[in-house]
Image (tube, coloured by chain):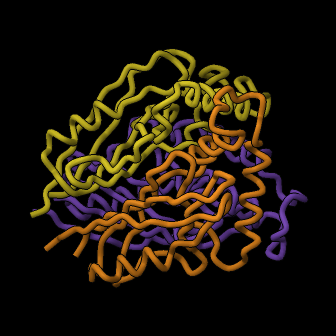
Chain colours: A yellow, B purple, C orange
Amino acid sequence: MLRQCGTTLLFETRGRGLVEITRHVAEWANGSEIQEGVLTLFVRHTSASLVVQENADAEVREDLDRFFARLVPDGDPLFRHRDEGSDDMPAHVRAALSGVHLSIPVAGGRLALGQWQGIYLWEHRLRPHQREVALHLVGD
Amino acid sequence: MLRQCGTTLLFETRGRGLVEITRHVAEWANGSEIQEGVLTLFVRHTSASLVVQENADAEVREDLDRFFARLVPDGDPLFRHRDEGSDDMPAHVRAALSGVHLSIPVAGGRLALGQWQGIYLWEHRLRPHQREVALHLVGD
Amino acid sequence: MLRQCGTTLLFETRGRGLVEITRHVAEWANGSEIQEGVLTLFVRHTSASLVVQENADAEVREDLDRFFARLVPDGDPLFRHRDEGSDDMPAHVRAALSGVHLSIPVAGGRLALGQWQGIYLWEHRLRPHQREVALHLVGD
């Protein structure tokens, strides 16, 4: 018999960069005792995103953030929306490019992540923020 | 007891740019009377996309579109696929960068969007088009 | 009564580029005999991605890959993570930009893809790889 559960997890970021949240998400999913199903994650903000990335070498995440900083420069004169700071509109663009939601199957009681995959909350603002991630799991 | 429902919504775009569809999507989801669950949206085209973005200042969407127009220029000589116009291949690239689907949890009878989040259909072609968005909702 | 099924499909890539997997995915989904529901696809790697793109003109996929190669150049001196080759960190960035998962509604016993849409596994490494795609389908 299929069933579902949901929650909202809160994370503190330390300014721009990727924060690994795999363990927190997996602990909540494991607690549901759902063995087979699908997990949805959704970040409730417009200047943060959710990505699956390599969990081995921290330089990967630093390079990723460095690439995005070059691609979408803070204070770019192209942008007219500047009232909330020079890093605000770039944060919205970075969120559009990297995405605000993830869907990950659950199989054999585990998230179907590959060996080198972790789940990351990506803070795009320069300052620390508290971020809400809504989770939903359906399965049995 | 879990149940599901689905539909296809049609939207008219007025050429390149973001069209807010939050209200239409929420009305359909509310009509299902599903209180907890997860909503999937999927745009059935290769030159439009679906994004969650800031719903307050219209300049954010204009800046977003302006950034994408600079990143993926119309008529870029890099592109060989030109038969359908100088904005066609850029539209496919823009769709790959921003995504054609969204998954949003439903909690307490409402889409779990943050306060500043809206759902947008992003038209990437210069001319107006009619676009189909397939919706699916599972929950109870 | 809602039910679910899941599997993992293996695909061999021939190096960088897009591999159409629509037929394999649709065959598996059809075999479930689920008429209405939602399909989730998730690639279990950090240097490949999943996209929905035009299925008509092969030049579209070549242009898409050519655009990404220019946007995220192999061997870019910006990147410090270089131990696994000059195409490795670009592959992670390309995966962040294009996404590792897809959600596609099923309606009337068919994937709700538009007429010109196909499902593609995008290999971002230069060499051939075997890639695992986890699938999950819920519906009835």
Q: Residue furthest right?
A: B77
Place residue C73 in its image quadrant: top right
Residue under the point 44% across and 59% down: C132
Residue under the point 26% across and 38% down: A26
The quarter in which the C terminus of chain C is drawn is bottom left
**Vertical placement of residue C27 versus A81, above or below:** below
**Left or right of A81 on screen, residue C59:** right
x%, y% of residue A95? 55, 38
Is there any visible trace of residue B7 in the rendered image?
Answer: yes
**Left or right of B67 on screen, residue A36:** left
Is there any visible trace of residue A89 in the rendered image?
Answer: no
x%, y% of residue C33? 27, 83
Residue under the point 52% across and 32% down: A47
**Vertical placement of residue C127 versus C57, above or below:** above
Place residue C123 in its image quadrant: bottom right
x%, y% of residue C117? 57, 74
x%, y% of residue C79? 70, 29
**Left or right of C87 on screen, residue A44:** left
**Vertical placement of residue C121 versus C98, above or below:** below
Residue under the point 72% across and 35% down: A71
Place residue C89 in its image quadrant: top right
**Vertical placement of residue B122 versus C113, above or below:** above
The quarter in which the N terminus of chain C is drawn is bottom left
